[in-house]
Amino acid sequence: MCKLFDEWKNEIKDYCDKQGLSFEKAEKLAQSWNKTMVALSYYDSEKGKNGLLDETPCPLVLLIRREENGELSFEQTEYTAKYIGKVS
Amino acid sequence: MLYNPVTKTVFTPNTSQTANLATGEVRAEELRGWITKNGKHIFIGDNSGGGAKSGKGLDNSQKSDIIESKEVKTMTIGLIDSPIEQKHTGKGNPNAITTFGVELNNRQKQLLEQLPEFDSRTIVAKDSVNMSDLSALTAETGHEFAMFTKGGERLIIRGNERMVNIDIKSAEQLAKEGYKWSGHTHPGINYNCLIASPGDREVLKCFSQNTSVIYNSKGQYLTFQKE
């Protein structure tokens, strides 16, 4: 788990609760990050056997960003409900 | 860059120059004061009057909310002779290449000459290239590039719009030879293209390191890790 996700864990959980999303599913997703952002994507370990010859990206599920005003902002994608929706 | 519609002047903070769009006059100034940008008050110049972030001590009664400046010298020069952005051309900057179509810098041009086509490979000194350079090459060509590092050398491999010619077997071979996977690029300008593919994650498993990076055509990056 990346440090940022760990630091933001409580805020992410609050957001998931309010949006009807599963934090438990979210924290199991693959994580990518930089200094101000964490991207959660769905990684299918059955794929990728061709290495860099197949660069089809993992579906981006949730984008979490620390804004300049200190607030976390969340950006859902077409895959959010599919992979971390509570009813999926 | 800040535009004052009243005086028809453009101020460039990083060059400290003010250009009058009506007359073509350019003034170099020592600037010190508050500016208002995106609703935030920012202090420019000597910061002895308070922190740039705090905004404390700002006199809201001031009439000019654009800028307060102390002029030390004024010179009139032609815009063509000395463009405002002369010192900051953006050459070699991935975002400037993508957004404004500026050139690669000379070092990047030389590197690209060594990588003329898909699967071209070159080994260069470690301190002569970084991931931002690969991002610039991607901005220029629309192709992926991958970089592997061993000691003081870097192996650069050119891909195409969709792939780099590194399968699992060749990744294992590179790891066996002592290389680390410094990172690679994905053509594009949004955050979706910064997401690792399953293939990226499988290749990372071949190396002893835990993380690698993906840069896009604007120089933005995300780090990804082994799952």
Image (cartoon, rainbow, N blue to C red):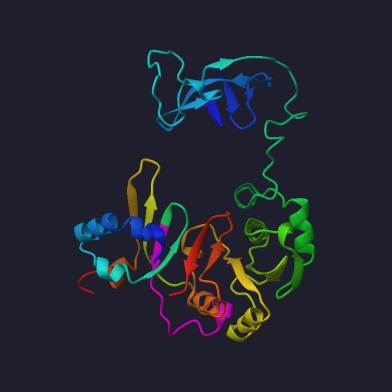
Residue B116 in sight from this viewpoint: no
Residue A31 vs residue B38, the one in the foreground = A31
What percent of the width, then of the height, locates residue B75?
A: 73, 17
- Residue A58: which quarter of the image? bottom left
Residue B153 part of the magenta segment: no
**Magenta: main secondary structure:** loop
Left or right for B129, reference B66 = right
Left or right for B117, reference B71 = right
What percent of the width, then of the height, locates residue B31?
A: 59, 21
- Residue B129: which quarter of the image? bottom right
What percent of the width, then of the height, locates residue A85?
A: 24, 69
Q: Quadrant of the N terminus of chain B?
A: top right
Residue B146 vs A68, above or below: the answer is below
The residue that appears at 79% across and 59% down in the rendered structure is B110
Residue A36 vs residue B37, the one in the foreground = A36
The residue that appears at 52% across and 17% down in the rendered structure is B68
The residue that appears at 75% across and 24% down in the rendered structure is B78
The magenta stretch spans which residues? Answer: A38-56
Residue A5 vs B95, above or below: the answer is below
Residue A55 part of the magenta segment: yes
Residue B107 vs residue B47, the one in the foreground = B47
Residue B45 vs B169, above or below: the answer is above
- Residue A37: which quarter of the image? bottom left
Residue B192 in sight from this viewpoint: yes
Residue A78 vs B99, above or below: the answer is below
